[in-house]
Amino acid sequence: MHKRSFLGTAVALGLLGASGLAMAQDNVFKIGLILPMTGQQASTGRQIDAAAKLWMAQNGETVAGRKVQLIVKDDGSVPANTRRLAQELVVNDKVNVLAGMGITPSALAVAPIATQSKTPLVVMAAATSSITEASPYVVRTSFTLPQASVALADWAPKNGIKTVVTLVSDYGPGLDAEKFFKSRFEFNGGKVPEALRVPLMNPDFAPFLQKVRDLKPDALFVFVPSGAGSALMKQFAERGMDKAGIKLIGTGDVTDDDLLNDMGETAVGVVTSHHYSTDHNSPANKKFVEAFQKANKGLRPNFMAVGGYDGMRVIYEALKKTGGKGGGDALLAGMKGQIFESPRGPVFIDAQTRDIVQNIYLRKVEKKNGQLYNVEFDVIKDVKDPGKAK
Ligand code: PHB
């Protein structure tokens, strides 16, 4: 009699313990953040990781009664790794949201997993137009290359640039940049005598730049992914391209704020178009930059950091809208149509395309207080991805 009741109590206690644990687990809202923390794109991982952690430090780790847990995984920007990690995060960790995606091939590798598991995939970096079409569960908080390129193709011919050679990394975002810059520039009466493509991994720009020197266009339009701008800038200077009268223009990826200060005099005067500059003049950005630098030993936030920071906001707000329930479809619905003030300016998650609508700024590299900045001098408001307009 005694024994039985003791056993019974023990079993009951055991069950209670287990279910209590399960309840605590259920209460955790998991975000699987896959980033390149190593390899050629490591600066992107470092920026987004820091920004996501800043968001959580500023906004708390409990949202609508749920404890938010960030699970960061390093894919080294190898798409097969991204895919495997996403699978593990969905199946083993049962994450509520997948996020990150440092490069386009990573995002495309994960899109089918998002669809099959009905898990929202918040793309914070990758910027090929078609990514949002790869899964109805993709929501993007970065930008698209067509969005960034078209403004420059309108600016250039009005500013004495009639011939342009394009030079892009030979994969999704580069091909988007080339296509949309070229067609808009030619529509505006400009000429593109040559469109050059360089390998994404370990590019040697020298032979391509030699070719550009021989062609002697008014300007060279460049897209290289965040992190690769310094190498391009260095070789541009070494070949004496600027001295030969060839201007350098591009999307803001090449004058990445993370690297800009080390690029030296060659960078001064370079005109780019992009959605974010550390120098963006708004109270929201001043606050963001100050807090980011304070938390990261003075590191400057670049456009990748802003994609990560805003991605976290989109996830937090969606979770609030579901009242903490957080199922995949409900979260997705909560992400669509969000409007808010980002450090980059006003933004909007288009409910139809799940892509970000935002201002695109024209900027020129200038020295201010001994430091190099992308200083904004013009803005095109509320730009939708032209890649989706067809
Ligand atoms: C991309 O792979 O989509 C990508 C990466 C870095 C950038 C832009 C696009 O700066």
Image (cartoon, rainbow, N blue to C red):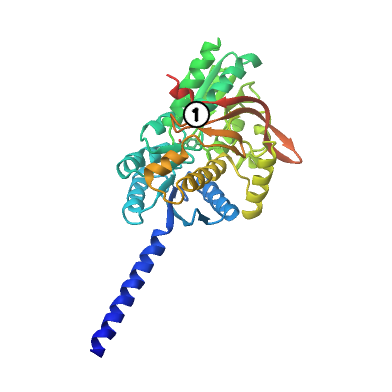
Q: Identify the image quadrant of the C terminus.
A: top left
Q: Is residue 361 visible?
A: yes
Total numbered badges shown on the rendered structure: 1
Quadrant of the rendered image containing residue 60: bottom right
Q: Identify the image quadrant of the N terminus.
A: bottom left
Q: Nearer the viewer, residue 382 or 291?
A: 382
Residue lying at the far top of the rendered structure:
189
| Left or right of residue 348, residue 23 in this image | left
Residue lying at the far bottom of the rendered structure:
2
Q: Is residue 103 visible?
A: no
The amino acid type found where label 1 is placed reads Leu
Residue lying at the far right of the rendered structure:
369
Quadrant of the rendered image containing residue 100: top left
* Above or below, comparing residue 59 to residue 189 in the picture: below
Q: Nearer the viewer, residue 224 or 208?
A: 224
Look at 38% across and 45% down and name the residue there.
Answer: 328
Q: Residues within 10 Å of mark 1 (few under 14, many from 20)?
A: many
Q: Nearer the viewer, residue 103 or 309?
A: 309
| Residue where numbered disc 1 is placed | 145
Look at 55% across and 53% down and name the residue there.
Answer: 56
Where does the image place residue 27, in percent across and percent down from the top left? 42, 59
Where does the image place residue 88, in percent across and percent down from the top left? 33, 53
Look at 61% across and 36% down and name the residue there.
Answer: 344
| Left or right of residue 147, residue 332 in this image | left
Where does the image place residue 193, in percent across and percent down from the top left? 50, 15
Dot 1: element: helix
Check mark 1 vs ligand 1: CB closer than 8 Å? yes or no: yes
Where does the image place residue 31, in percent across and percent down from the top left? 44, 51
